[in-house]
Amino acid sequence: VQLNVSGILCMLRITEVKLPLEHPESDIKDAILTRLCIPADQLISFTITRRGFDARKLSNITFIYTLDVEVKDEQAILKRLKSDKHLSLTPDTQYQFVTQAPAQLTTRPVVIGMGPAGIFAGLILAQMGFRPIILERGKAVRERTKDTFALWRQGVLNPESNVQFGEGGAGTFSDGKLHSQIKDPKHYGKKVLTEFVKAGAPPEILYVSKPHIGTFRLVGVVEKMRATIEALGGEIHFQSRVDNIDINNGQVSGVVLSSGKRIATNNIILAIGHSARDTFQMLYDQGVYIEAKPFSIGFRVEHPQSLIDHCRFGKYAGNPLLGAADYKLVHHCKNGRSVYSFCMCPGGTVVAAASEPGRVVTNGMSQYSRNERNANSGIVVGITPEDYPGDPLSGMAFQRKWEERAFELGGRNYQAPGQLVGDFIAGKPSTAFGSVQPSYTPGVHLGDLSTALPDFAIEAIREALPAFEKQIKGFAMHDAVLTGVETRTSSPIRIKRNDDFQSINTQGLFPTGEGAGYAGGILSAAVDGIKVAEALALNIMHQIGPK
Ligand code: FAD
């Protein structure tokens, strides 16, 4: 029996094990025995490492498994089946800490922001013994939920406690999709998912190909992770907005909170998300290097979920093993723009995602069950700094302009402006909903969206919707509902950093996550948070030198 470097038993990994959708559990074991050509007594145990499905043939949707199996003599099997490219030793994906803080360490790092990037940076630092101080401008997640509902149900916005700000960050009221296309040779993603499961997320997220948690479960997960960080000596302060960072000779020396309190530190993780516009401004005014970056703008679209299910799964539509179907669409337009679907939420709702008074922003979320009647996604157009020339913060001004326009078109009460897809394509204002009832609350104000975004974006989306019809029959249905505007697809800036993860002109400042322009989505922000935590820990160890 061989052990890997983590001291864990070597296993064999079998990929591409195809089984019918509705197969008995015992078929997995039988498939292993057949693939390895071994008798049952040679197989000790197995685990499902990944389960996806192949829905390309609607007449026969199949599950595709990756399995890790423990057998009596893995080397002999590997030798015998050496030509099988779907068989290998299981890679070692165990997370290894890069260092451990000495027990007498007095210096403490500060983490600004408690979204996925800040939580994972804080957790890893705490697990390595660095006792981080986490400062979050919003409230603890349960109180924050009440404030968020106040906007959704009564049209009352709290600019410091909302969908964007508060414990758990922007992804808390979301679909909780946890897949990402980032390169991850060190298996940081596995560490993230493992910690989520330890905190109460469903264990299947470790193996299903497109894992998701859903909003209500995320709330509990975030609370448990907070308790873990605190149990390891970390401190978490809510309603603690950082209004200033002290920088002396290009090195950070502390942070100043909105209360006036100052915390001295030489190491700061900046995990502020893409909506902290006042903090972006403060950093820019302080001379921290920032550059404008591309992002996307558009509308949310809502269709009946059953339409998407039938198109994607045919006769299997509604099968609980498959869940609600998703889609991913791209169209390259004649005017040179690309339109694509963003943050698709199967069986979910469109949500009010504003964080500033007098502005309207849409996004999407769902519960774990994904059983709401509509499917929604952002239909967005890629834009670049050439579309918003000016200083590095001009993308932010551009977002504000269109969010204000949406507030105006929606009736100045946080309702979202909307239009039916058929009317939008035909250039006619909408006056009544048809078969699709929109899910956005506090409400959708029907009218004409043709002035809700720049002309090039309207033109591109008008061209893309009928093009998407070719991929999903019914996508351009007359009664599908568009609501706007979707402007917070990613950060309009990058807080540029060096290979050592520190700002290129400010030592001790470690920008991370979506706001810094280094991640897009929960998983990638969390992974980025781990990477900066490692870099910061090594920086402290370097600063204190050998004992
Ligand atoms: P954030 O999550 O934005 O966290 C930043 C935190 O910093 C906030 O809590 C904020 O209050 C705090 N902060 C800001 N400034 C200060 C300051 N000056 N002082 C103290 N604290 C400060 N992604 C997915 O992968 N899957 C999804 O299903 C998904 N759905 C989404 C649905 C919605 C409604 C929204 C809004 C986003 C969704 N996203 C989703 C995107 C995802 O939430 C973000 O990519 C992710 O949260 C980014 O993580 P982050 O830690 O970088 O920033």
Image (cartoon, grey):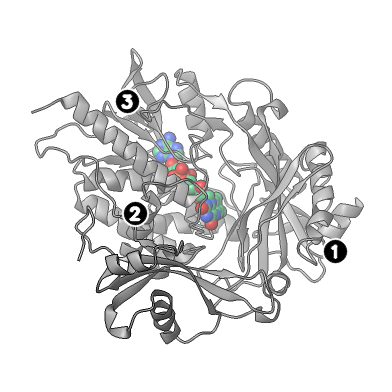
Q: Give the camera-side residue of 231 and 120.
A: 120
Q: Label 2 vs label 3: CA separation?
A: 25 Å
* Residue under the image location 33 percent in, 31 percent down: 268
Q: Label 3 vs label 1: CA separation?
A: 54 Å
Residue 47 in picture, x, y percent from top left: 35, 72
Q: Quadrant of the N terminus?
A: bottom left
Q: Label 2 vs label 1: CA separation?
A: 45 Å
Q: Is residue 310 above or below residue 158?
A: below
Task: Return the residue at label 2.
Answer: 191
Residue 276 in picture, x, y percent from top left: 50, 37
Contact flag, marks 3 and 1 (Cβ < 8 Å): no
Numbered-mark total: 3
Q: Which mark is residue 508?
A: 3
Q: Quadrant of residue 108?
A: top left
Q: Which mark is residue 478?
A: 1
Q: Give the camera-side residue of 473 and 125.
A: 473
- Side of 140 relative to 438 (left or right): left
Q: Give the camera-side residue of 319 and 127.
A: 319
Amino acid of disc 1? His
Q: Quadrant of residue 295?
A: top right
* Residue under the image location 45 percent in, 51 percent down: 523
Amino acid of disc 3? Gly
Label 3 residue SS: loop
- Side of 112 relative to 174 (left or right): left
Q: Which mark is residue 432?
A: none
Label 2 residue SS: helix
Q: Quadrant of the C terminus?
A: top left
